[in-house]
Amino acid sequence: MRARTIVLALIVLATAALATLNWGALATPMPISLGIAVVDAPLGLVMLGLTVLLGVLFVAYVLALQGTVLLETRRHAKEMQAQRELADRAEASRFTELRSFIELQNQSAAQSEAALRAALLERIDGLEHTLAARIEQSDNATAAYVGELDDRLRRSA
């Protein structure tokens, strides 16, 4: 864009220099046909005036186009900001949902762990009772065997 600006400035300067150097020829009146009438006017100044008018219209068009682009860019930036905020809110809600899901999973894991612990303790208690009963039976059987052996030894003695 910088090169285009330099070239445009050089063209304007060359046109101004040519108009200054040839002012006498530009200001010389001559008959000009307007289609319906003929007028005596300086043709060079008329052409230079039309060129300046065309340049002014071109600059006005460029400024209007640039203004439209700036307004459109601002509108797009606002829309993008609104979409970004919407996405941030959606992401925050997803994080909240994820946090609640993880908490729910932790609670269910804690409940299942508590249930397994209770079942394990209950089973251990059952095994302890069974083991205590077997030990008691074993003690009784051993006492019975010892008693029987003692009776046999007394009878044989």
Image (spheres, helix red, strand yellow):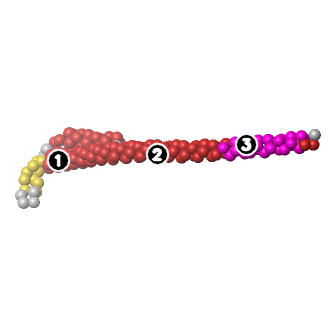
Which sits earlier in the primary sequence, circle 2 or circle 1?
Answer: 1
Callout count: 3
Please tell me whether mark 3 sits on a helix, a strand or a loop.
Answer: helix
Q: Residue 144's image quarter? A: top right
Question: Taken as a whole, is the magenta stretch helix, strand or loop?
Answer: helix
Magenta span contains residue 139? yes
Distance (Cα) linking label 2 and label 3: 47 Å
Please tell me whether mark 2 sits on a helix, a strand or a loop.
Answer: helix
| Image quarter in which the N terminus is found | top left
- Dots 1 and 3: beta carbons under 8 Å? no
Can residue 129 be seen?
yes
Amino acid type, residue under disc 1 in the picture:
Leu
Between 137 and 107, the one lying in front of the other is 137
Residue at mark 1: 53
Residue at mark 2: 104
The segment highlighted magenta reads 129-154
User: Which x, y percent locates residue 101?
Assistant: 45, 46
Q: What residue is at 32 percent from the left and 40 percent from the top?
A: 6
User: Which x, y percent locates residue 116?
Assistant: 57, 46
Q: What residue is at 6 percent from the left and 58 percent from the top?
A: 37
Between 114 and 23, the one lying in front of the other is 114
Residue at mark 3: 136
User: Which x, y percent locates residue 110?
Assistant: 52, 43
